[in-house]
Amino acid sequence: MGMALAQTVGQYVFFYWGLDLSSGALASLLVASGSFWWVILAPRFGHSPSLSGNQWLVLGAGAVGVTMAVYSSPDASAGSNPRLGTIALLGASLFGAIGQEPDLPC
């Protein structure tokens, strides 16, 4: 039941809210951010080893790249509030990652 709520309610509400506030191009870029959540959550809930310093560095570089893409997006002003839309879309991908992990206490 928790997984269904996380994926259905959390993911879709945040996704469509973020899509309403930002552009479709920005949303398509941020939907892939679920991989970042998986990397961060895996050591905690997936019983995998903690991230090394180099792995955190690469993760940070990827986050900087996504941030640069968000702020340099030519159609970032297409929505009513692209910054809030970005936060909502990142929340949607977090709920998606949480919903796909069977060991999480949902």
Image (cartoon, helix red, strand yellow):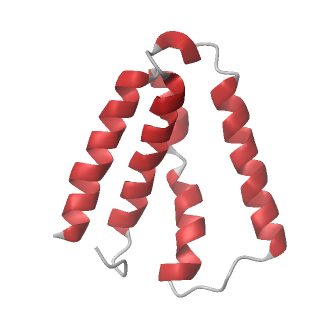
How many marks the image carries: the answer is 0
Q: Name the residue located 33 percent from the left edge and 64 percent from the top edge.
A: 99
Whether residue 45 sits left or right of residue 71 in the image: it is left
Residue 86 vs 24, above or below: the answer is below
**Is residue 41 or residue 31 the one in the foreground?**
41
Kindly give the residue lying farthest to the left in the view shown: 1
Residue 32 vs 16, above or below: the answer is below
**Snapshot quadrant of residue 70:** top right
Q: Name the residue located 68 percent from the left edge and 37 percent from the top edge.
A: 67
> Which quarter of the figure is the N terminus placed in?
bottom left
Residue 86 vs 56, above or below: the answer is above
Whether residue 7 sits left or right of residue 62 in the image: it is left
Q: Position of residue 42 (x, y in %)?
A: 54, 75
Q: Position of residue 14 (x, y in %)?
A: 34, 41
> Which quarter of the figure is the C terminus placed in?
bottom left
**Snapshot quadrant of residue 49:** bottom right
Q: Name the residue located 37 percent from the left edge and 56 percent from the top edge.
A: 95
**Snapshot quadrant of residue 59:** bottom right
Q: Position of residue 62 (x, y in %)?
A: 72, 49
Q: Position of residue 38 (x, y in %)?
A: 53, 65
